[in-house]
């Protein structure tokens, strides 16, 4: 697409955004050009909070399906748009509501903590929701010493180590983070002896063992801003580079050479954002009974943010 065509698309997006009283939220893993036009960029928790507090009538969610669902759970009176309904999350898709019910039957009385990367139906079956940023805090705050944790096994293992509680983890994973190997990170550390390594807790335990810091996506930005190191190896999705470079122009960032790109996150494009604002669709609407049940777990996550 020519630069002129891109400018035309951006101009129309901005015009329509005003007319529709819309706000554009973009997850940190989105394409750089989509992040550029967003009103706010952030992680799941930050964007959920913004969705809850905005006065806008329309939320254009540039992220994946469960994120738009979470926005709708918190703001049912607003129109929630997801510019491409195929933008799903393979991690969220590993578990269904009936799987959670079965886990409860097998472990009577054990509370369920569910990572925000899950469907509204799964959240509705859970007692608490959490993000990668507050999973440890949420699990600590639950009075039980045994916890059912869904759907990410790597985050579950990280929480087990941090809290010392017995974690009954669902065997799901994020294919983007789970693919990162300790060998490739070890090679990067050998090649850049002055570099520090910061990793997302969706990475495997053997990768997290090499990390100087384990942090959520927002935590990774904070770490990159405050570390004195000039070279930083990032164990997370490559879309983070947009903000990392913008906030730290004097630092160099390395990502796993085997790739860490989430194709689902990249399905949202400027053209789709425009189409979505023009037609006010596709919309994401969580059925009211599911929404009300999921809201309780999500509100607990937000209050412990
Ligand atoms: S990066 Fe992983 S958890 Fe995030 S949307 Fe992609 S597959 Fe899901």
Image (cartoon, grey):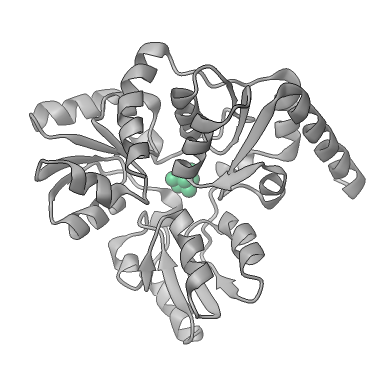
Quadrant location of the C terminus in the rendered image: top left
Picture coordinates of residue 164 (x, y %)?
13, 56
Please give left or right for residue 82 compared with residue 69 in the image: right
Q: Residue at x 17, y 41 (%)?
A: 142
- Tally of marks: 0
Please give left or right for residue 280 compared with residue 142 in the image: right
Picture coordinates of residue 257 (x, y %)?
53, 68
Kindly indicate the quadrant of the structure image that contains residue 110. top left
Q: Can residue 153 be seen here?
A: no
Q: Residue at x 59, y 63 (%)?
A: 244
Please give left or right for residue 59 compared with residue 160 in the image: right
Quadrant location of the N terminus in the rendered image: top right
Q: Residue at x 31, y 24 (%)?
A: 124
Picture coordinates of residue 255 (x, y %)?
53, 67
Front residue of 198 and 173? 198
In the image, farthest residue toward the right: 4
Kindly indicate the quadrant of the structure image that contains residue 281. top right
Kindly indicate the quadrant of the structure image that contains residue 168. top left
Front residue of 111 and 64? 111
Q: Can residue 111 be seen here?
A: yes
| Residue 46, above or below 190 | above
| Residue 69, above or below 116 | above
Please give left or right for residue 164 compared with residue 76 in the image: left
Q: Residue at x 83, y 32 (%)?
A: 12
Picture coordinates of residue 118 (x, y %)?
38, 34
| Residue 96, above or below 264 | above
């Amino acid at each position: 697409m020519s630069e002129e065509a891109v400018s035309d698309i951006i101009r129309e997006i901005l015009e329509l955004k005003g007319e529709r009283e819309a706000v554009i939220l973009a997850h940190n893993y989105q394409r750089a050009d989509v992040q550029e036009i967003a009103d706010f960029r952030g992680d799941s928790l930050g964007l959920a909070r913004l969705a809850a507090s905005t006065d806008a009538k329309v939320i254009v969610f540039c992220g994946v399906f469960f994120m738009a669902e979470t926005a709708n759970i918190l703001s049912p009176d607003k129109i929630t748009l997801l510019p491409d309904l195929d933008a799903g999350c393979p991690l969220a898709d590993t578990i269904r509501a009936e799987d959670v019910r079965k886990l409860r039957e097998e472990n009577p009385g054990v509370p369920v903590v569910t990572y925000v990367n899950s469907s509204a139906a799964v959240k509705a079956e859970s007692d608490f929701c959490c993000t990668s940023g507050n999973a440890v805090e949420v699990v600590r705050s639950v009075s039980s010493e045994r916890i059912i944790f869904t759907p990410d096994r790597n985050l579950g293992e990280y929480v087990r180590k941090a809290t010392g509680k017995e974690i009954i983890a669902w065997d799901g994973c994020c294919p983007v983070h789970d693919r990162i190997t300790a060998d490739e990170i070890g090679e990067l550390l050998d090649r850049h002896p002055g570099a520090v390594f910061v990793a997302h807790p969706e990475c495997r335990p053997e990768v997290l063992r090499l990390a100087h810091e384990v942090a959520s996506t927002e935590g990774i930005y904070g770490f990159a801003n405050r570390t004195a190191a000039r070279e930083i190896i990032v164990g997370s999705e490559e879309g983070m580079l947009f903000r990392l470079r913008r906030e730290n122009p004097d630092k160099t960032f390395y990502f796993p050479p085997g790739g860490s790109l989430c194709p689902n996150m990249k399905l949202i494009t400027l053209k789709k954002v425009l189409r979505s604002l023009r037609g006010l669709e596709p919309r994401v609407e969580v059925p009211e009974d599911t929404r009300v049940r999921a809201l309780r777990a999500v509100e607990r996550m937000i209050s412990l943010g």
